[in-house]
C-alpha cells in the first residue's frame, strides 16, 4: 500500500494564486468598463433588456414610448377571508392597468394593503345567505367602486375575480 502525501502548503498556494488571478481579472474588467464609459459620447445605453423601444426614447417621455403597455395587477395574491357562517372564502383579485403611467403604478403598489382590507371587509360583511353563493358581478362592481374610491392618480376600469370558492368549515 502506498501513501500519497499531499502538500497542504502547495494546495493553499495554488488556491491563493487562482483567487488572485480571478480578482485581477475582475479589476481589469471594471477598469476597462469605466474607461469605455468615460470615453463614450452620447447617453444611449449600450445594451437594453426587454422591449423594442430604446431606453432613450422612453426617458425623453415620448407619448409613444410605451403606449400600449397594459399589464395585469395581481399583487393582492390569494385572499383567505373568514365569512359570518364560519366558512372561508378564497379569492384572487386582479385588474388591468397602464404600466406606462408610473405615478399610478406606484400608487397601486402602495395601496396593496388597503385593497386587501377593502376586499376582506366587503366579503366578510356579506349576510349569511349570500356567503354560500357569492354574486360575482355584484362583488366586482362593489369592490371596483371601493378600490377606485381610495385611488387619487387614476382609475381601475375592470376587475377580475379568480379562484373564487367558499370552503365550508362549519361542518
Image: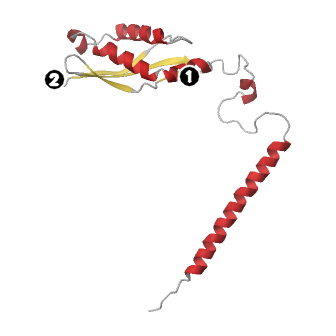
**78 sits to left or right of 41:** left
Asked whether residue 145 appears in the rendered view, the answer is yes
**28 sits to left or right of 92:** right
Residue 50 against residue 65 in the figure, above or below: below
Name the element at disc 1: helix
**3D distance between C-alphas at marks 1 and 2:** 40 Å
In the rendered image, residue 23, in percent from the top left (x then y), is placed at: 68, 61
Asked whether residue 54 appears in the rendered view, the answer is no
In the rendered image, residue 1, in percent from the top left (x then y), is placed at: 44, 92
**Count of residue discs:** 2
Q: Residues within 10 Å of mark 1 (few under 14, many from 20)?
A: few
Q: Quadrant of residue 15?
A: bottom right
Q: Nearer the viewer, residue 143 or 114?
A: 114
Residue at mark 1: 106
Name the element at disc 2: loop
Give the foreground label among 1 and 2: 1
Residue at 47% from the left image edge and 10% from the top image edge: 148
**31 sits to left or right of 136:** right
Q: Nearer the viewer, residue 13 or 92?
A: 13
Residue at mark 2: 170
Residue 14 against residue 71 in the figure, above or below: below
Question: Sequence-wise, which precedes: disc 1 or disc 2?
Answer: 1
Q: What is the number of the mark on residue 124?
A: none
In the rendered image, residue 88, in percent from the top left (x then y), is placed at: 25, 23
Residue found farthest to the left:
171
Amino acid at each position: 500500500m502506498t501513501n500519497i502525501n499531499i502538500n497542504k502548503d502547495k494546495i493553499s498556494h495554488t488556491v491563493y494564486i487562482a483567487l488572485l488571478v480571478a480578482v485581477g481579472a475582475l479589476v481589469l474588467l471594471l477598469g476597462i468598463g469605466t474607461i469605455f464609459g468615460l470615453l463614450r459620447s452620447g447617453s444611449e445605453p449600450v445594451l437594453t433588456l426587454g422591449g423594442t423601444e430604446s431606453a432613450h426614447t422612453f426617458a425623453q417621455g415620448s407619448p409613444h414610448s410605451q403606449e400600449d403597455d397594459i399589464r395585469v395587477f395581481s399583487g393582492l395574491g390569494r385572499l383567505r377571508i373568514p365569512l359570518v357562517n364560519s366558512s372561508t372564502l378564497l379569492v384572487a383579485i386582479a385588474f388591468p392597468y397602464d404600466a406606462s403611467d408610473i405615478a399610478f403604478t406606484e400608487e397601486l403598489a402602495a395601496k396593496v394593503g388597503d385593497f386587501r382590507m377593502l376586499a376582506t371587509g366587503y366579503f366578510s360583511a356579506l349576510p349569511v345567505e349570500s356567503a354560500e353563493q357569492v354574486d360575482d358581478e355584484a362583488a366586482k362592481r362593489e369592490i371596483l367602486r371601493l378600490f377606485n374610491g381610495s385611488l387619487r392618480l387614476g382609475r381601475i376600469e375592470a376587475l377580475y375575480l379568480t379562484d373564487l370558492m367558499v370552503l365550508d368549515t362549519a361542518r
